[in-house]
Amino acid sequence: MNLNYRKQHRMEIDFDKENGLVPAIIQDADTKTVLMLGYMNEEAYKKTVETKKVTFYSRSKQRLWTKGEESGNFLDLEDIKADCDKDTLLVRARPHGPTCHTGTDTCWKEENKPHFGFLSILEGVIADRKENAGSGSYVSSLFAKGINKVAQKVGEEAVEVVIEAKDDNEDLFLNESADLLFHYLILLQAKGYTLADVEKILRERHKK
């Protein structure tokens, strides 16, 4: 084994605690969704670092196993961190297709998609109001009035934000900002898009 590799990495991860293996939690580098749990020995860890393809030690096959070597659903390595006890790894990666062998995005049958905390919950509520236009809610009434009315509301709220930004009332500024963001989410839904679509464009611009 490369001595430089051993010097740099051997002392950072305790491979001796559990018979040469450490759990490796795989997380999507972008969405932060937990995809799967595997095990690495030192050789699997070294190969992961060198090839940038997440590789495990298969306890059933008793050999190294690169995720995707048969399915093509590789996990491209982004980074690896050890926990406080140096005996568990957090591996951030970008998946090519489903991660689970059953064909699901994760081994917990969860959909791997971006989540923006409460904003995603709010998007779900807005989507429901769009589908149930007769609910009598404010959001449903906006959808019923059409895209022009929704866009007009975004414009009005944007003007209010600009006006409050020039004053010193932080409470009004934040409330108008919330109104703007809320109506922008409605406009996105009216156009058939979500925050994830906007985030994707921002990420692509960031890479350039």
Image: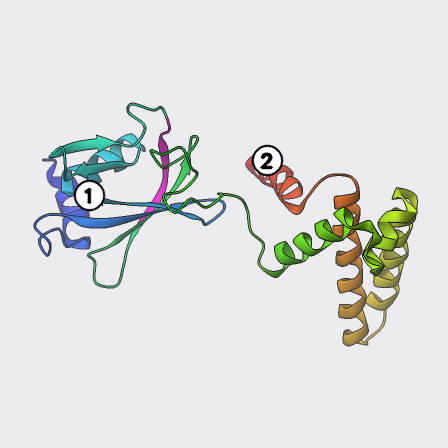
Q: Is residue 75 magenta?
A: yes
Tell me if mark 1 has few (under 14), some (14-19) or many (20+) residues whose alpha carbon lies within 10 angstroms of its own.
Answer: many
Residue type, label 2: Glu
The residue depicted at 29 percent of the width and 32 percent of the height is: 67
Q: CA distance from mark 2 to mark 1?
A: 32 Å
Is label 2 in a helix, a strand or a loop? helix
Q: Provide the major secondary structure of the magenta segment.
A: strand
Quadrant of the rendered structure where residue 28 is? top left
Q: Position of residue 5 (x, y in %)?
A: 17, 41
Q: Which of the 4 quarters of the picture holds residue 12?
A: bottom left
Report the side of 207 relative to 34 (left or right): right
Identified at 80% across, 47% down, the residue is: 187
What is the tally of numbered marks visible in this picture?
2
Image height check: is 166 above or below 79? below
Q: Amino acid at mark 1?
A: Met
Residue at 87 percent across and 54 percent down: it is 141
Residue 160 spot, x, y in % from top left: 88, 63
User: Badge 2 is on which residue?
Assistant: 204
Q: Quadrant of the N terminus?
A: top left
Q: Which region is colored magenta? A: 73-80
The disc label shown at residue 40, or none: 1
User: Mark 1 falls on what kind of element?
Assistant: strand
Residue 33, percent from left and from top: 44, 48
User: Which numbered disc flags the more N-terminal residue, 2 or 1?
Assistant: 1
